Amino acid sequence: MAFSSGKKNKLWVWKAYDRVTGRLIDWELGNRDSQTLSRLLERLAKWKVTVYCTDDWKPYQQLLDEHPDAFHVISKRETVGIKRNNSDNRHWFTRFHRRTKVVSRSAHMVDITMAIFAKFRVNGNIELLRNWRLSLLS
């Protein structure tokens, strides 16, 4: 998922999504390049991820071929869940809307927003958010 933090500087959110549970495992902010993907793959090693379902983008193939235990499936049919997750992300947080002026220029704020999205919308439930909000107000 990408959004512009300026006309020249695009910030990409790379996500690792568990297709079975529907949980967001991790994410990485950066460019749409191999270095950003490498940082995400390094962190995913602790989760012992072995199956990667991606679209047909060259850095996926290059980096995943280096992992002997990785099984790489290239198919848009297998990425429906993450596409839905990206759509939900745009729905719940204005900063991720496409072609709008409502974009945070701070990668830190984007990272915090992703943490809130993962904790309360994807991996938890809205009741957790309500309770968290009430605890802040008291």
Image: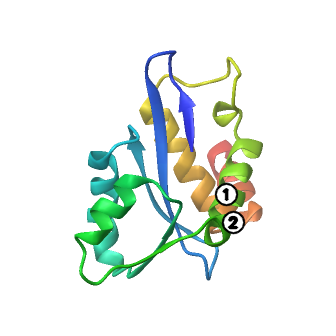
Q: Are marks 2 and 1 in contact (CB under 8 Å)?
A: yes
Q: Pick the residue in front: 80 or 135.
A: 80
- Of the residues shown, which amino acid type is indicated by label 2? Val
- Measured as percent of width and height from the top left, residue 30 is found at 38, 39
Residue designated by label 1 = 83
Question: Image height check: is 7 above or below 117?
Answer: above
Residue sitting at 51 percent across and 15 percent down? 7
Task: Answer left or right for 126 relative to 38.
Answer: right
Residue sitting at 62 percent across and 72 percent down? 78
Q: Looking at the rendering, which quadrant does residue 26 occupy?
A: bottom left
Task: Answer left or right for 124 relative to 39.
Answer: right
Residue sitting at 70 percent across and 24 percent down? 99
Task: Answer left or right for 77 relative to 35.
Answer: right
Residue designated by label 2 = 80
- Measured as percent of width and height from the top left, residue 64 is found at 32, 68
Tag 1, which secondary structure?
Answer: helix
- Measured as percent of width and height from the top left, residue 133 is found at 68, 49
Task: Answer left or right for 135 relative to 58.
Answer: right
Q: Pick the residue in front: 39 or 92.
A: 39
Tag 2, which secondary structure?
Answer: helix
Question: Image height check: is 66 above or below 29?
Answer: below
Question: Image height check: is 104 above or below 92?
Answer: above
Q: Looking at the rendering, which quadrant does residue 39 occupy?
A: bottom left
- Measured as percent of width and height from the top left, residue 21 is found at 62, 80
